[in-house]
Image: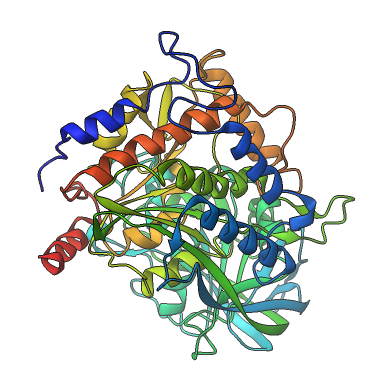
Amino acid sequence: MPRLIVTVVAACLLGACSDTHNRSAAPAVAGQSMTGVDVDRFRKDVEVLSSDEFAGRAPSSVGEELTVDYLVSQFEAAGAIGGNNGSFVQDVALMSITPTDVSPLNFRNDDVSVVLDIGDDAVVLTSRQVNSVAVTDSEVVFAGYGIVAPEYDWNDYEGIDVAGKTVVLLVNDPGYATGNDALFTGNKMTFYGRWSYKFEEAARQGAAGVIIVHETGAAGYPWGVVEGGWTGEQFTLQSDDRNAGRCAFEGWISGNAAAALFAAFGHDFAELVSLASSREFSAIPLGASVSTAIQSTLTPSVSQNVVALLPGAADDETVAFTAHWDHFGIVDNGEEDSIYNGAVDNATGTAALLEMARVLADEPRRRSYLFLAVTAEESGLLGSAWFAEQPTVSLARMAGLINIDAMNVHGATNDVTVIGYGSSELEDSLARAAAGQNRVLVQEPTPEKGFFYRSDHFSFAKKGVPVLYAKGGVDHVEFGREYGLRVSEQHIRERYHQASDEIHDGWDWAGLEQDLNLYLGVARELAASDTWPDWLPTSEFHALRAQSDAQRR
């Protein structure tokens, strides 16, 4: 597939997306940028969506009802039509699994017993859609990173049968652990490094239980995120398979707890971690068994994706946007503030869909715009996965998808962070839009955290649709790169997936406006074009797009 060719119309449209900080530009109307973005209107949407009234926007809650009603009313007022055969909503069948009694992880052999309590040391849950699971005296095996990847000549399960056993695994992948570019993709996490893959692979291997050892750098977030996100009510998609292809229990233990656990049974954890980074590594029985039990209540429910469409002349071709509207709702966290408002994550991205729909509604376009506000992202990309399996438009005729998740609230930047940099030709369009703002594209500063696999665009990438996940960079226009890194890290540490993710006086709306204009520039070019962007040949999704090309032809 050739690189994107910019048509004259696209170039003119893109030219409208000028940097709002360009001193040579004519002054904008107060509160409004030169491309039609109304920052005050956008701010109001963020305030409404992240308000206490919306109660943290948990799926299948009063917060969802308020959120969906608000989004539908705003898309309709913008001039969009329902994108699901005329309806603005798509039902998503969820199952709520709420643990009511979780036993500690009890490791023992004839001589030693180690109990890891739920909370500071461990978290445990089940994804099976049953009221009760119990694992008794399951042999424990350290299986390295828990990866089976033939293309990397790697198999941590080779030579051992873990059926009915419990595997203890390391987070991330060997490339990150060693910094060796010859292993996997070096410091950049692959999908094999994600906890979701490890849980699924352990189930494929027949394991009864799977435990991941947490490490902040390798995971990309502190233990508090694990403890907060893996306790209480959990959602999964409803399935006729009550076991849902998952181990009986899934869990995490802290790094300190892992070191003490291994030592108690005669192993040097640090030494085993080092051995696990070699292709010659073989899984090692810990010399212990583990027991735990989980009682849960199951509540089936129907949540909703919101689907809005601005039809184009070629109405069967679309340019799509995704943003998840959900967050964690109200969490019993023992603090005075128990509402997880999710202002950055992801009231900003959801409000961006509304504002772009308003701006784009009256503009000419060849391709249609699809705005998809999805549910249950925080529960494992469930809403986007549901849509990708039951799309309301042809995925083969989707020119590209722009994902917006947790926008930059720290101010305008000289750079644009591309999550999964070097993946698709959509980056050509992004580079042109960024140049119009005097910005450059850069790889994410922490590729080891695997953000490419942690948001809704990934559900579409797995179907071959070229996706773009980009956001404000870290080189702050006024204060520089070190400042940008510092405030980003501070947000992760103090607000990410916490009740403190609320609008506060420290927000700088210039970065939000800048990125809104950036997305609009890319979208306008794609909507005016008749070419079909592709994944780059080095991408793991390139072959899938070739299948889409054949289907489209």
In the orientation shown, which residue stands out farthest toward the right?
336
Q: How is the image coloured?
A: rainbow
Q: Is residue 202 above or below residue 445?
A: below
* Left-right relation of 105 to 310: right
Q: Nearer the viewer, residue 347 or 134?
A: 347
* Left-right relation of 176 to 231: left
The number of discs equals: 0
Q: Can residue 279 be seen by looking at this rendering?
A: yes
* Left-right relation of 117 to 164: right
Q: Is residue 170 above or below residue 420?
A: below
Indicate the quadrant where residue 424 lies. Answer: top left
Residue sitting at 43 percent across and 65 percent down? 197
Residue sitting at 74 percent across and 28 percent down? 505
Q: Is residue 225 above or below residue 206?
A: above
The C terminus lies in quadrant: bottom left
Q: Can residue 472 be seen by looking at this rendering?
A: no
- The image position of residue 519, as x and y in percent, is 40, 38
Residue sitting at 72 percent across and 82 percent down? 296
- The image position of residue 226, as x and y in percent, is 65, 56
- The image position of residue 17, as x and y in percent, is 37, 28
Residue sitting at 20 percent across and 59 percent down? 545
- The image position of residue 244, as x and y in percent, is 50, 83
